[in-house]
């Protein structure tokens, strides 16, 4: 699990001996920052308020810890651990997205349909399904969160490819 950095690479070490970050690491750090910021961006919009990941409890904690861990692993050039923390964050985000969409779909099934053969169909209920879709609408926070997690995953794969196996 402890992968050595490719110290001989020209973009890793400067002439004065200071280690600097490579381009893929900057991309990964930007992604970790974006996924952390994505916790506080609106995920779903409702009539008068916005739902953020931070207001949902345990998913925010897991993604926040995974983002912070990913940033640490990126700086330490640990490709496999960076990839693992990105996969954890992606899994929680996809779980939440799928669960919310399934809950929204089950909510629209509760309203009578506009089918003319349905005795329970009323003029008031004709637009209820459309209203539920409009009221509980995904917002731009999903894009920030998923693009940030994607950048962390790309960085993890890039770090795994750039690290040489240790000589024994």
Image: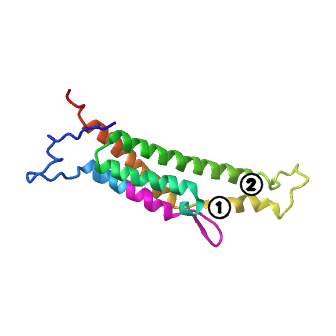
The residues colored magenta run: 32-51
Q: CA distance from mark 2 to mark 1?
A: 11 Å
Which image quarter holds the C terminus?
A: top left
**Residue 45 percent location from the top left of the image:** 60, 65
Residue 4's tag is none
- Element carrying mark 2: helix
Residue at left 59%, top 51%?
A: 96
Residue at left 38%, top 50%?
A: 70
Which image quarter holds the N terminus?
A: top left
**Residue 90 percent location from the top left of the image:** 49, 47
Vertical relation: 23 (above or below) 5: below
Residue 109 or residue 26, whichever sits in front: 26
Residue 36 or residue 2, whichever sits in front: 2
Residue 43 or residue 117, whichever sits in front: 43
- Label 2 with label 1: CB-CB less than 8 Å: yes
Residue 136's tag is 1
Q: In the rendered image, which residue does mark 2 sit on?
A: 107
| Colour mapping used in the image | rainbow
Is 36 one of the magenta-colored residues?
yes
- Element carrying mark 1: loop
**Residue 97 percent location from the top left of the image:** 58, 51
Instruction: Estimate how packed mark 2 is, as few (under 14), some (14 to 19) or many (20 or more) residues with alpha carbons within 10 Å.
Output: few
Residue 62 or residue 156, whichever sits in front: 62
Residue at left 28%, top 54%?
A: 26
Give the residue at the far bottom of this rendering.
48
Q: Is residue 67 left or right of residue 134?
A: left
**Residue 119 percent location from the top left of the image:** 91, 53
Vertical relation: 149 (above or below) 8: below
**Quick one: label 2 or label 1, which is nearer the N terminus?**
2
Instruction: Estimate how packed mark 1 is, as few (under 14), some (14 to 19) or many (20 or more) residues with alpha carbons within 10 Å.
Output: some
């Amino acid at each position: 699990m402890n992968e050595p950095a490719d110290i001989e690479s020209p973009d890793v070490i400067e002439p004065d001996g200071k280690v600097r970050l490579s381009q893929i690491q900057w991309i990964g750090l930007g992604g970790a920052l974006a996924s952390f910021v994505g916790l506080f961006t609106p995920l779903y919009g409702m009539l008068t308020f916005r739902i953020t990941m931070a207001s949902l409890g345990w998913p925010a904690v897991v993604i926040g810890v995974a983002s912070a861990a990913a940033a640490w692993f990126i700086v330490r050039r640990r490709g496999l651990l960076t990839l693992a923390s990105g996969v954890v964050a992606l899994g929680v985000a996809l779980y939440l997205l799928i669960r919310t969409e399934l809950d929204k779909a089950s909510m629209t099934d509760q309203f009578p349909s506009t089918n003319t053969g349905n005795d329970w169909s009323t003029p008031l209920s004709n637009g209820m399904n459309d209203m539920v879709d409009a009221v509980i609408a995904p917002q731009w926070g999903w894009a920030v969160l998923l693009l940030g997690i994607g950048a962390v995953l790309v960085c993890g794969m890039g770090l795994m490819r750039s690290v040489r196996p240790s000589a024994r």
